[in-house]
Image (cartoon, rainbow, N blue to C red):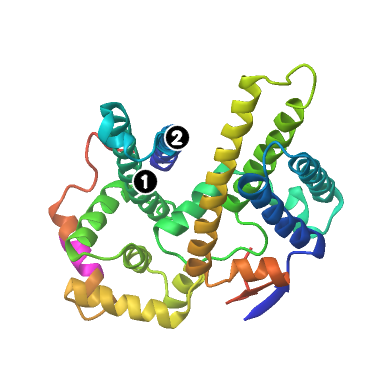
Amino acid sequence: MQYEKSSKESLALIGLILAQSICALFFLSDVATDAYWMGWSAFGGSWHLTVEALATLALIMGIIVEARYLMQMLRRQSRIERGISIASGALHELMEEMFTDWKLTPAEQDVAGFTLKGYSIAEIAQMRGSRDGTIKAQLNAIYRKAGVENRGQLVSLLIEDLMRAPLIKRETAV
Amino acid sequence: MQTVKVWDLFVRLFHWSLVVTFTLEALVLDEDSNLHEQVGYFVLALIGARIIWGLVGTKYARFSSFKPSIPAAIGQLGDMATQRETAHMGHSPLGALMIYNLLVSIALIGFTGWLMTTNMFWGSDGIEELHEGLVIWAGASVGVHIVAVIFESRRSHVNLAKAMVTGYKTLPKQDRN
């Protein structure tokens, strides 16, 4: 199943992030102790310390990029979690594209996903642990960004795209 | 709105005693002093008491109420990624992992510290480096813990730090787990 596969992928990514964080922590404390004992002037005197510090910085930046990618993956995963239709793979890809086009925030993407699946405002509020009013405000923002008036029009946008694209791609068929 | 007593007096006393003693040991006390050793044994006693309380204590203090679970932790990460506002009654899955991490690493700090006083390892550089490395690890974990508490308090609209002082969590809605 797609869900299990992506779950394994995110687990591997979490493992990688953890391992790299431990390395970063090690190098960072090493640089800090060296700088502490040799004084900050050591950065000018020896290339070694400067290069080490820059390498550590690069490692940390890599971790940040990975963390952002992980968040993206988890977002996708939490949406697929409740999709059970055979077409969910292709459908989700389309939804994702539309959401990116409209520049929806992560929260709005989540709400839009639930809305397209037909959940009511009260049900979405329940699942997201927020108030009905919050969901209504987020829905309004989604409609505004998508350029539609209501849920019906939002769904028809998706259907329209869906009829143009093949429902199930050969290589990603579940 | 629903206010629930989650942390008993022991859990809160344990938490804040650990905060004070860990800070003292890592940042304030002279590491070669007698006091550093004494406080270290006190921390080990604290951890021991917490483990016993985790077996016989009140509902949310028991380990059985916050078993380590990777799927649940990933679920919570998903909630964070999608900016859902779901709250947890007791320890959250990620919070639980942090607790086990801190309990184990602080216990190991105490253990390696004690080893340094034994005849076998007295003056051993390896054990000392391990001791200090573990302190850096635990210190970084504490940093992550604090940032996570602030982030999760904002996301779930439950003031987690306040709950660790008063013992009560105020949850916005009723049906949470």
Give residue A63's quadrant in the image: top left
- In the rendering, at what x and y percent does residue B85 appear? 49, 68
For disc 2, the chain is: A
| Circles 2 and 1 on the same subunit | yes
Disc 2 marks a residue whose amino acid type is: Trp
Mark with earlier residue (2, 1): 2
Q: Which mark is residue A67?
A: 1
- In the rendering, at what x and y percent does residue A157 appear? 19, 67
- Between A59 and A73, the residue placed more toward the observer is A59
- Between B145 and B126, the residue placed more toward the observer is B126
Q: Which residues are magenta?
A: A155-160
Q: Quadrant of the C terminus of chain A?
A: top left
Q: Residues within 10 Å of mark 2 (few under 14, many from 20)?
A: few
Q: Main secondary structure of the magenta part?
A: helix
Which residue was labeled with disc 2? A37
- In the rendering, at what x and y percent does residue A100 appear? 21, 59
Compared with residue B124, is residue B89 higher up or lower down, i.e. above or below?
A: below
Q: State yes or no: residue A156 in magenta.
A: yes
Q: State yes or no: residue B33 in magenta.
A: no
The span from disc 2 to disc 1 (Cα, nearest Å) is 33 Å
- Between B61 and A134, the residue placed more toward the observer is B61
Dot 2: what SS? helix
Question: Which residue is painted at 65% across and 48% down in the image?
Answer: B99
- In the rendering, at what x and y percent does residue B16 appear? 71, 59
Disc 1 marks a residue whose amino acid type is: Ala
Q: Is residue A95 left or right of residue B134?
A: left
Give residue B109's quadrant in the image: top right
Give residue A60's quadrant in the image: top left
Q: Quadrant of the N terminus of chain A?
A: top left
Compared with residue A145, is residue B92 higher up or lower down, i.e. above or below?
A: above
